[in-house]
Image (cartoon, grey):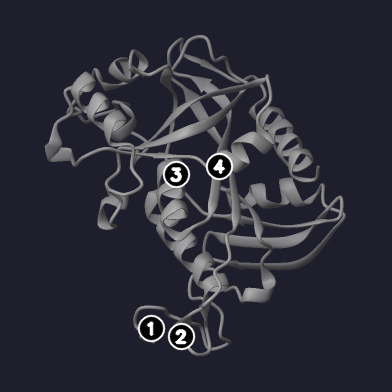
Amino acid sequence: MIKDSELILNPDGSVYHLNLKPEQIATTILFVGDQDRVEKITKHFDAVEFTVQKREFKTQTGTYKGKRISVISTGIGPDNIDIVLNELDALVNIDLKTRKIKDTLTALRIIRIGTSGSLQADIPVDHFVMAQYGLGLDNMLRSYLIDSISETRLEKAFIEHTHWDLKKGTPYVIGCSTELEQLIASEQIHKGITATAGGFYGPQGRVLRLGIQDSALNSKMDSFSFEGHRITNLEMETSAIYGLGKLLGHHCLSMNAIIANRANGTFSQDPYKAVDELILYTLNKLAQ
């Protein structure tokens, strides 16, 4: 039995941070970072049956073209993903009354719809990127036993190419769900490795008043290639979603609307339009 201190429930029986009960989520879930983006998705739904918010975690569950879908805002960063993935898994795979793991486990389908900056000059703003791999620069997932699921050859090649300082921790690489990749992919989608940083400024190479450990890291990532795979973009959630999802037996995919291009210094003239187009593209693929 899982102790009260390890799986914390609210007085109404919902999981602690998400404030959700098992019947309130669908098995297909869309992740967004911004809580205000939840309704930018659910405005397209046929109907919304449930809404709840606690802190930055907002959830709405409803139907789109007859398919039941939940939309959840995760907030920013790998640490928040640790909360959201573990609590969602508890909702479907742990009996919250007996506090025991269920004999039959449920695999969720989780798709992140996010925004990101491209690291490649030939991936322009307003285009979409699918992460075939998540490259974690953040160390969060190293708290778990990931050796059986990580792409160790790709990790080693990245460390050697960038002359990575291991005082910052060891990067990890996790692949996406091939099932969801096949469902969502099309010729208009760019594919590659999405790098996940643990912060927005220094960890992503931005310099304001503080110097950073490796000012050339972004250019090193630009030029990295492994067996035809290159690093396409940089954000703050994908590798954590892929790692925890794969460890827990869920299918995960990360889709990003490119709103900035770090290689040529451009920013989208209408980032909201790009995000809305990615939302509709993803919803319609799921509804097929």
Q: Give residue 100's position: percent from left, percent from top.
A: 45, 83
In space, the residues marked 1 and 3 are separated at their CA atoms by 27 Å
Point 16% across, 23% down: residue: 163
The residue labelled by disc 3 is 237
Looking at marks 4 and 3 on the same chain, the residue that comes earlier in the sequence is marked by: 3
Point 31% across, 29% down: residue: 154
The residue labelled by disc 1 is 2
Looking at marks 1 and 3 on the same chain, the residue that comes earlier in the sequence is marked by: 1
Front residue of 150 and 119: 150
Tag 1 and tag 2, C-beta contact below 8 Å: yes
User: Which amino acid, mark 2?
Assistant: Arg
At label 2, counting other C-alpha atoms closer than 10 Å, the crowd grade (few under 14, some 14-19, many 20 or more) is some
In space, the residues marked 1 and 4 are separated at their CA atoms by 29 Å
The residue labelled by disc 2 is 99
User: Which amino acid, mark 3?
Assistant: Glu
The residue labelled by disc 4 is 253
- Side of 254 where 247 appears, left or right: left
Looking at marks 1 and 2 on the same chain, the residue that comes earlier in the sequence is marked by: 1
Q: Quadrant of residue 234?
A: top left
At label 4, counting other C-alpha atoms closer than 10 Å, the crowd grade (few under 14, some 14-19, many 20 or more) is many
Point 67% across, 51% down: residue: 38
In space, the residues marked 1 and 2 are separated at their CA atoms by 5 Å
In space, the residues marked 2 and 3 are separated at their CA atoms by 29 Å
Residue 33 visible, this orientation: no
At label 3, counting other C-alpha atoms closer than 10 Å, the crowd grade (few under 14, some 14-19, many 20 or more) is many
The kind of secondary structure element at disc 4 is strand
The kind of secondary structure element at disc 1 is loop
Residue 158 visible, this orientation: yes
At label 1, counting other C-alpha atoms closer than 10 Å, the crowd grade (few under 14, some 14-19, many 20 or more) is some
